[in-house]
Amino acid sequence: MNDKRSGNTRKGLLLMAQGAAIAALYVILTFVSQALGLMSFDVQIRFSEALCIMPFFTAAAVPGLTLGCVLANLLTGGAPWDIVFGSLATLIGAAVCRAVSKRLRGKGKDTLAVWLSPVPNILANTAILPFVISWVYDSPISIPLLAVFVFLGEAVSCGIGIPLAFALKKREKYMFGK
């Protein structure tokens, strides 16, 4: 029984460390995007969104991405409703990504799971953020056009994660204990 508890503790610590590392990377990559001026246009490129593929590898990515988004939005001066609803979009995208990836991987469709990993995040942000941008930041741009801008920015940002996922997949056993 001691060995089993020790294994559970070890796994729990590993998941917490993975989640914390993902959150920290999310914040750092958001700062990089901001420093390069990529977050001040209608189509924003947030390098941190490339990490939306991480739920493919570990359940720890769901809280890690969510916490990272909350912290990044707080630290970059996001409005309170943007912090809440932007982080909610990230949570939804990450949770759906995890569920879809797990199901597809269980059927031996890893490659398809990698390609689909960014889709939930792109869709969640496209569905939620145009309203936030319109109402919270009083944007003069119509909500449908904001949705196009958010979609484009998310597609580029999250799309960067696909080659990252294929690279990580080669080292998955060592990095994620699989």
Image: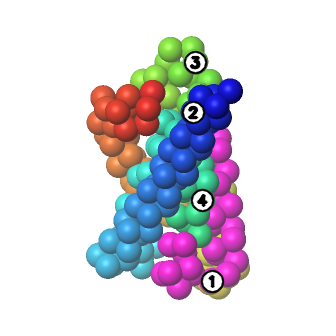
Which image quarter holds the C terminus? top left
Helix, strand or loop under label 1: loop
Q: Nearer the viewer, mark 4 or mark 1?
A: 4
Q: Amino acid at mark 1?
A: Ala
Number of numbered discs present?
4
Residue 7: assigned label: 2
Q: Are marks 4 and 3 in contact (CB under 8 Å)?
A: no
Q: Amino acid at mark 2?
A: Gly
The residue that label 3 is drawn on is 106
- The mark nearer the N terminus, 4 or 3, is 4
Drawn side of residue 61 relative to residue 28, left or right: right
Give the Cα distance between marks 2 and 4. Answer: 26 Å
Q: Amino acid at mark 4?
A: Thr
The residue that label 4 is drawn on is 66
Task: Depth check: give the residue in front, 125 or 71.
Answer: 71
Drawn side of residue 28 relative to residue 154, left or right: left
> Magenta segment, principal secondary structure?
helix
Q: Are marks 4 and 1 in contact (CB under 8 Å)?
A: no
Residue 79: assigned label: 1
Q: Is residue 39 located in the magenta-colored stretch of the structure?
A: no
- The mark nearer the N terminus, 3 or 2, is 2
- Up-down relation of residue 68 to residue 11 (above or below): below
Helix, strand or loop under label 2: helix
Coordinates of residue 92 in the picture (x, y in percent): 67, 51
Q: Nearer the viewer, mark 3 or mark 2?
A: 2
Could you tell me which residue is drawn at 42 percent across and 24 percent down? Answer: 111
